[in-house]
Amino acid sequence: MRRTAGLCALLTAAAVGAAWTIGDAAVPERAAASATISSAVSNAAATGAATGAAANAVSNAARSAPLSAAPGSARLTPVVAKKKKKKLRKRDVMVIGANWGGTASIVDARTYRTLRTLNIVPDKAQEMQEIWTNPLRLALYLVIQQVIGQGHDQLVDDLFTTRDGNLVAVSRPSFGDVVWIDMATNRIVAEQQMEGFRTDHMEVSPDGTRLLVSDSTAKKVHEYVLGGRGNPDTGKKLRTFPSGETPHESNFIAGGKRIVHASIGRVYTPLDAGELGELGNVIKADRWLQIVRNSDFKILQRWDIGKELAEAGYPQMSSAVRPMAISPDERYLYLQVSFFHGVVVFDTQAKDLNNTVDYTLGGVPEPRTGRVLRLVHLPIKESVKTMPREEYVLDSAHHGMAINKAGTKLCVAGTMSDYGAIVRIGNLTSGAWKQKIFNAGLKPYWATTSPYSNTCWMSMSGTDQVVVYNYKREKVVAKVKTGDHPQRVREGHVSARVQRAWR
């Protein structure tokens, strides 16, 4: 013990002597002090001194050495290590679009703190001038505003950050375009106008290089280069595949080799097709669920889910597939359909129930596989049970569904009944599924599973917030304030460059 203490004292004294420095001029007294201490340390080390007495000798030498500089000499300062600045890295975020407000909230994916709110319509005055001077665009703009937007401009539908974390690509329904905005400067760096008059859902390829955009009134889905800062091809249009009336959601499967896509028909017209038969099909138009091969955009399979439901014993239900969730093995689709308060379980690989071709959609015959396995009913608010269906928001009983990474739970937006639900996936053909209902906000309209944590982010469009649910604990863990009427929530990144600009 004494040997250790003595050694520590020797090292301490040596360090003290070595650490003294001066500014611009030599100080004789300090140099002498350093020499005295160094001599004591050398003598102690030469004699193998490690005892308390030897250590004391060194300590006494240090104390007796002159410590003050001569008058007028340079000031003595200890050497202090400079504190290194923390290096900024690309940051994982969730991006929330406010449909009516025209803003995007950039939120830290783990702390739930809003880092920045971006203006997605910095060119609004210019866009409005172009609309007001074009009679056809003006007519469609007013229809979108009054009918689909419930009297509001639809300024943000969907949004994704580029792979480098510098830009955000945003579909703007009322302007019928997609813009790429530099998140550091809030300036538009690229823009693409649709063939039609309204943009809607988007999706990004698994490698983060391609962007799919639903062109609502043109019945097409376009592919663009997602790009990034400094990429001259950012926003370049590449290919197009056909869709039914009002193209809606797209999801990549098979590592990006195929795309699951649905069109929802004319959800803004009164009456559903269920009771009206073929007349209803004319009113609502083509509502297709299809599988597209990515290599050449060939339509591999195309279903009419209303007809598949009827074939499975559930007649007079809508063919319009709203948001969907896909099982990890990509065999099962969990579907929301117009006016239904629950989940439709669809097996894409099971043989067709009657093994006959009952319909052809746009030249594509009914697939030989694909079967509705069951319905899972979820609660309906009392006031909604007697509500005319024309009062449903764009035919949406439910609009928003996500699945956890393990594929064991669904996160469901009960739009018209004002709740969010965590639903445990049970038997795929029969039996009850356990449900936990959360009354956390009004008019939930989208759900996204964060890839950065075991959470579901659900937009509450009626209360201007996003509620974050923990799948494992089945409880609300955060509420994030947003702009006016939040809808889509997507995962993304912001670069170190963008973060520096935000300081």
Image (spheres, grey):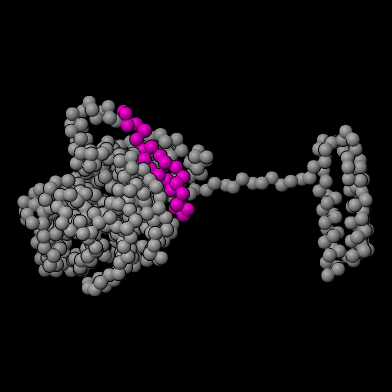
Quadrant of the rendered structure where residue 32 is?
top right
Residue at the location (82% across, 56% down)?
A: 12
Write the start and end of the magenta stretch as one range: 103-126
Q: How many marks?
A: 0
Residue 238 visible (yes or no): yes
Residue at the location (69% across, 45% down)?
A: 82
Q: Position of residue 8 (x, y in %)?
A: 82, 61
Residue 36 visible (yes or no): no
Quadrant of the rendered structure where residue 418 is?
bottom left
Does the magenta run of residues contain 122? yes
| Residue sitting at the far front | 383
Residue at the location (88% across, 45% down)?
A: 67
Q: Position of residue 373 (x, y in %)?
A: 20, 68
- Comparing 497 with 117, the one in front is 117
Is residue 474 rendered to the left or right of residue 321?
Answer: right
Residue at the location (17% across, 58% down)?
A: 385
Q: Position of residue 375 (x, y in %)?
A: 20, 66
Does the magenta run of residues contain 62? no
Is residue 375 rendered to the left or right of residue 311?
Answer: right
- Comparing 331 with 487, the one in front is 487
Which quadrant, please, contains the N terminus? bottom right
Quadrant of the rendered structure where residue 430 is?
bottom left
Q: Position of residue 449 (x, y in %)?
A: 37, 57
